[in-house]
Image: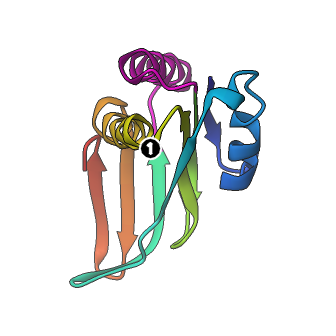
Amino acid sequence: MIAKILKKDDENFTINQLMDEVKKNPRINECGAIFSFEGIVRGKEIDKTTVKMDLTTPDIEKTQVELEEIINDIKDKYGVVEIGVVHYVGEFKPSDPLFLAVVAGPSRVETRDALKEVIERVKYELDFKKEEHTEDGTNIIMSGG
C-alpha cells in the first residue's frame, strides 16, 4: 500500500511515479489490470473561473491514518493486489494535480470498481477543506464537495 498525504512542495509524485511504485508489489504478476486517476484543479466552469485553490486538512496524521484504513478496506473488499494514493494539501493553480490514485488487480472489473470507490471515499470521508479563490471572491467547500 502506498498512502501519502503530502504538502504540495514537500514531495512531488507524478501519476507515472505512483504507477511505478504500485508495480513494485511482488504480486504484480497476478494482475491483469492497472487503472489510474489524476484529479486536477478545475480552472473554468460555466459560472466561475478559479484563480487558485487552498486545500487543507486540520490534522495531517489523522487524515493519513484514515486514508490507510480506506485503502485496506477497499483492498479486502475487491481483492485487488495494490493501491497507491497520493493526496496533496497546499496552494494550487488550475491544472495542478491534487489527488493521484492507482489500483492494480486481477481483472478490469474489480480493479475499476476499486478505483471508483477509492475516489469517492477519499472525496467524501476524509476531512479536507477547499478554498476556491475565484474572480468573484472565495468559496469554501468542505469534504464531499
- The residue under the point 70% across, 30% down is 29
In the rendering, at what x and y percent does residue 144 appear? 25, 43
What element does badge 1 sit on? Answer: helix
In the rendering, at what x and y percent does residue 128 appear? 39, 39
Quarter of the rendering containing residue 82:
top right
Q: Is residue 83 above or below residue 120?
A: above
Compare residues 43 and 67 and report the one nearer the observer: 67
Q: Specify the principal SS of the magenta part.
A: helix
In the rendering, at what x and y percent does residue 89 appear? 55, 45
Colour basis: rainbow
Q: Which quarter shows the N terminus?
A: top right
Please indicate whether residue 28 sits to the left or right of residue 120 in the image: right
User: What is the count of numbered marks?
Assistant: 1
In the rendering, at what x and y percent does residue 42 appear? 41, 71
- The residue under the point 37% across, 51% down is 130
The residue segment tinted magenta is 56-81
Q: Is residue 72 above or below residue 127?
A: above
Observer able to see residue 3: no
* Magenta stretch encompasses residue 67: yes
Compare residues 12 and 37 and report the one nearer the observer: 37
Other residues around mark 1 within 10 Å, as few (<14) / some (14–19) / many (≥20):
some
Q: Which residue lies furthest to the left in this view?
A: 47
* Magenta stretch encompasses residue 37: no
- Which residue type does callout 1 highlight? Arg
Which residue, given by chain and number where applicable, does mark 1 sit on?
Answer: 108
- The residue under the point 35% across, 43% down is 116
Observer able to see residue 110: yes
Compare residues 78 and 51 and report the one nearer the observer: 78
- The residue under the point 75% across, 48% down is 17
Q: Is residue 116 above or below residue 105?
A: below
